[in-house]
Image (tube, rainbow, N blue to C red):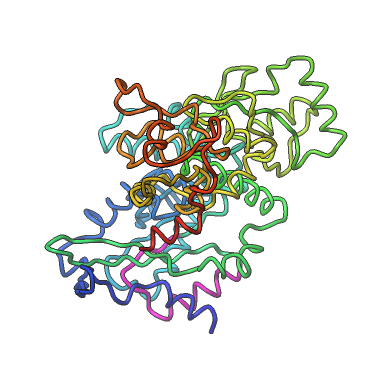
Amino acid sequence: MHRRRAYEGGTVDHLFTVAGQTATPISRTGLAAESLLERQHLQEWVIAHPQVLGESVLVVTAEYDRWADTDGVPARDRLDVLGLDATGRLVVVELKRGTADRDVHLQAITYAALVSRFDLGTLAQAHRDFLSRRGQDLDIDACKQRLLDHVDGEWSPELLQRPRQVIIAADFPKQVTHSVVWLSEMSLDIDLIQVGLWKVEGHLVAGFTKVYPTPEVEEFTLAPARVEGEAAAKKLQERSRSRNAVHVLVGAGLLPDGTRLRLTPRHGAPESIRNAIHSWVEEDISRATVTWTNSTAKPLIWDADGASYSPTGLANHIFTSVTSRTADGIQGTTWWDVDTDHVPADVDPEEWATLAGIDLTGLARQLNGTRKDWTGLHTLLGTVPAGRWTTYGDVAAVVGSHAVPVGTHLATCGQCPNPWRVLNVAGRVSKGFQWPDQTRTDTPADVLIAEGVRFNGDAADPETRLRRDALRQLLGS
């Protein structure tokens, strides 16, 4: 009963446009009713926006049919979309513009079985053909490198043999949902995504909702059986954690490009190997530092060679360089700490200092769910009255961000209301503050004093500070 309720809970039963107290129902329609087709329309939406298939999915090919039976006779099956996610698993996608067929899951399983024998060369050729049909001319080596770069860590044939399956349809009959629940429990990884279509003021709006598995089912029921064998499961889990941490940090905009990180070996390296790594680093101090770039694929530029790496990829490389052994399930995002001695431009030093001693995994844990949508921030700042001030940290807590990206945004936006009313944690004007109008000669402190805020030296009176609870009340009103 729990799983059935979880499945039903993923759908949107009622949708309204709202104007104050008036809520007007939005009429639901369907792809067929609007003369929209699977291949020409739904498939193109998925190719253009692969995030509907999960985080960090690269579309390898679509409409793939270049396989043959063992006797050389070409197969008639045509795979709708084939993707590759950052953990190194293939993503097999089956599309239906209406209610899914009762045996749609069997089609998906068939395609998964066919692609499970693909190797890097086969995938690179399929990707090259796909790009060529779309007017992009990449040679086979460039396509191979593109696939390799997309994977966080070393290329793993064992993960490649365990494709994830995604079925997208307007609705799913009970035969499909019941079968998928059972198949998932039997170690097959199948997602059901419902595509809905609505008419809103003369426009069509499409929505994609993952209806199975829900996060609760995925965490407590399916996760232990995702991949055959403990080694492969561990590898997938660590890669997923590292991938997710990088995506969270890039999405939140916490670390500006150019942020310096320092090596501190942790997860997957026992004390003896950590000591060996420290000795190895002392031979060449450039081995201990990297520069962060906001790339979800390879955000670290290593000082030792100038090459780009994923956090786990570089941790694995360092582990192997020191031990001459292949690392086993390192979570590389635990190996890199923010170097708070180097403060990026436009960042308040006192706020930056709060990141000391925190690795990338810890930072991502603080920020999970945060995105760089500053609409709420602008709305909140517009409610801060004259004669009061607040801090980057308080504002960040209310809008679901962190003090550092909030401060960076205020320093560069030019559209934020009342930016002078936001100070650092000590109540002082941030060193990174700048007026959008570069000709202004007054300071935020001058403006605050004119508005009635008293200062003790360079620090604002804490009695006039608006803390997060007060900010929430302002935002709510």
Query: Observer-nearest residue: 73 or 23?
Result: 23
Q: Is 270 placed above or below 366 here?
A: above
Where is residue 105? Give x, y as percent: 44, 68
Along the line of sight, the residue nearer the viewer: 385 or 160: 385
As drawn, 442 above or below 110: above
- Which residue is at the far right? 272
Point 49% across, 31% down: residue: 430
User: Does the magenta run of residues contain 169?
Assistant: yes
**Residue stretch in magenta:** 166-186
- Residue 82 in sight: yes
Q: Is residue 197 above or below residue 126?
A: below
* In the displayed structure image, the side of residue 195 where residue 298 appears, left or right: right
Query: Would you say 139 lies left or right of 432 here?
Result: left
User: Residue 66 in magenta?
Assistant: no
Q: Residue at x 64, y 28 (%)?
A: 339
212 or 74, which is in the foreground?
Answer: 212
Q: Quadrant of residue 433?
A: top left
Measured as percent of width and height from the top left, residue 275 is found at 85, 29
275 left or right of 65 in image:
right
**Does residue 148 appear in the picture of this structure?**
no
In the image, farthest residue toward the top:
284
Residue 318 percent coordinates (x, y):
71, 28
The residue under the point 38% across, 49% down is 384
Q: Quadrant of the C terminus?
A: bottom left
Q: Looking at the image, is 293 positioned above or below residue 197?
A: above
| Residue at image coords 55%, 75% | 182
